[in-house]
Image: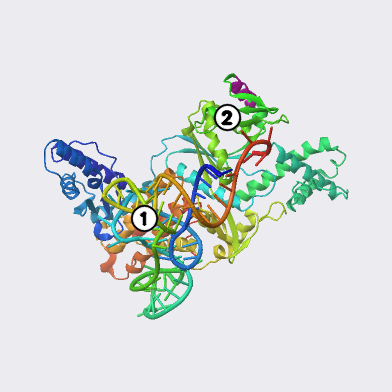
Amino acid sequence: MLQDQIIELITQAARKAQKKGDLPKTALPPVTVNRPKHAEQGDWSCALPLQIIRDVNNALKERGAERSSPLQIADIIAKRLPETPLLARTEVAKPGFINMFLNPAWLAAQAGEICQSGADYFRLPLGQGKRVQVEFVSANPTGPLHFGGARNAAIGDTLARLLENNGYIVQREYYINDRGTQMNIFAETLWRRYQQLFGLSVDIPDDGYPGAYMIDYARQIQAAQGDSLLALSDEQAIPRFRELGLAAVTAELADDLAMMRVFFDNWFSEQSLYEDGTFEHINTLLREQDDLYMKDDAVWFRASRYLPKSDRDEVFIRSNGEPGYYASDIAYHYNKFITRGFDWVINVWAVDHQNQAARMPAMLKALHIDPERLTIVLYDFVTLHRGGQEIKISKRSGELITMREVLEEVGVDAARYLLLSHSNEARIDFDIELAVAQNNENPVYYVQYAHARVSSILRKAREQAIDWGEADLSLLQDETELALLHKMLQLPEVVAEAIERFSPHLLPHYALDLARTFTKFYDACRVLSNDPTDAALSRARLQLVQATQIALAYSLELMGMNAPESM
RNA sequence: GCCCCCGUAGCUCAGUGGAUAGAGCAGAGGACUUCUAAUCCUAAGGUCGCAGGUUCGAAUCCUGCCGGGGGUGCCA
């Protein structure tokens, strides 16, 4: 990408200056460049002289030479920049910046390159075929997804889209917690609801699931099985209802997530880890390594030996004989890394799992897996509002706002955009009224509108049988045209940073920025014209518009949003 | 008690070592014989929670404090 090319130019110039004796041969830090905020400071800027002045002066002093200044160093490096079609000119600025101005002709030519290559122009060979699993959502299968799960779905799916568009082979996985205490309570609640449908006077457990959706599941089972299960004893019924309930819930989860445009490649059963011997295997392994010990009737895992700063161990098998969730996690990650051999695994978890996240490296070390191969992406909660008024979500009262309800009201595009537009660590106050507003208060539609406009221009051009495949792009000289090109070239940088920092929120901000830059061009420059003397400029601008369509559509695709042809 | 995250314009948020801190919305003023006005332009709006420190340079890194949220050995 362009940024790397600029960095390379500076690096070469600095090395050459050292080789030629303009600069003493000090160790150079990795070169960084940035886009200045002010136009007079160029398109790209580098502060390397300020970073190396101390080392340079020390070396000069040793040699008995006169001190230098950052400005002088900037000048020396600028003079040694290799010949390049990228840059038109370079300036040095106080106190020691090297400011570079892109060559407008080169910039304009990129419109043609983008039209030629399509979205591939913006894709990066980051993954090089590395196999990465993104595990996300993974909410307990005890009911429909509540709206908090939508944020997880948006972040996880967008990370997956970012990765698969940039050279990774991605698998999307949903981990089903289909064993353990919660599942038993769920099964018992469902069994009671089923019995109630036949008029039996039984109560759901005190700590059960009071939501009305449980009655819906019971009705589904009633519809499929009739009264044939009524004769079962509690001991027979609960495993059976666990199985039937699980099927009903996962079918609903898949439906809801499909509505969110999220499709999992694999639904992984926690229970399967106990059926296929994985748990037994790691149990033996850890025991042989002396990682397990007994205390208070429970089996503990010596996590502390793997975490230097911690003296805390973890329950492996609870005193009631049931493996704890940590045991499942160890078996699960053994399966991910050893059995299935993923190069890299990303888990997307809500912030209430922060402690669990901190304990993951210990288990990986015990399994002889490099902890670097696992990334936990934590995100904060979503609170729902309607016109400034918070909507309380309480699972206990059974009063929950499902993801489906919100999606039906605000639409998938708006939901995904708004959920993505905050950094992972920030809590989101999601206002349904604002999200649903289809007006200028809502940036979602601004971005999509830009795409619709672009599409409209191209459609009209085709109707007029204009062929813009050949164009003199050097005619693109307007400030807004060059700004638009410059903004498009930023897309790969945004993508690379979003992956680097696991921060999909950079995308909606970029998309809004790109849409704005386009709309300013649209306002300033007429594309289509009846005047034949405008034909050449018109063709050049059509290439620019087509390039914009590619960039906008790709940005929207990464966020899982529609790119409408008209609105 | 200890650990993690957040605190930036009236509101919602970007900005995670660069120059004069940015968007959107709201509020003020202006622009439609339009390739889609769901638009554009102009002006206004700030002790970057507070106090120290590191650095040529700090909203950004370190320490302490204040305020909000979360977590804290057998639920996942």
Along the viewing direction, whichever of A103 and A375 lies nearer the viewer: A375
Along the viewing direction, whichever of A511 and A311 lies nearer the viewer: A311
From the viewer's perspective, is residue A214 above or below residue A237? below
Mark 1, Cα crowd under 10 Å, few <14 / some 14-19 / many 20+, is many
* Image quadrant in which you'd find residue B45: bottom left
Taking the image as shown, residue A325 lies to the left or right of residue A519, namely right
Q: Which label sits on residue A335?
A: 2
* Image quadrant in which you'd find residue A357: top right
The residue positioned 72% from the left and 53% from the top of the image is A398
Question: Label 2 sits on what residue type?
Answer: Asn
Question: Label 1 sits on what residue type?
Answer: Ala
Same chain for marks 1 and 2? yes
- Disc on the earlier residue, 1 or 2: 2
Along the viewing direction, whichever of A291 and A164 lies nearer the viewer: A291
- Residues rendered magenta in the picture: A278-287
Disc 1 or disc 2, which is closer to the eye? 2
Q: State the residue position of label 1.
A: A547
Identify the secondary structure beneath mark 2.
helix
Percent x, y for residue A318?
69, 31
Q: Chain of mark 1?
A: A
Q: Which label sits on residue A461?
A: none
The residue positioned 28% from the left and 68% from the top of the image is A532
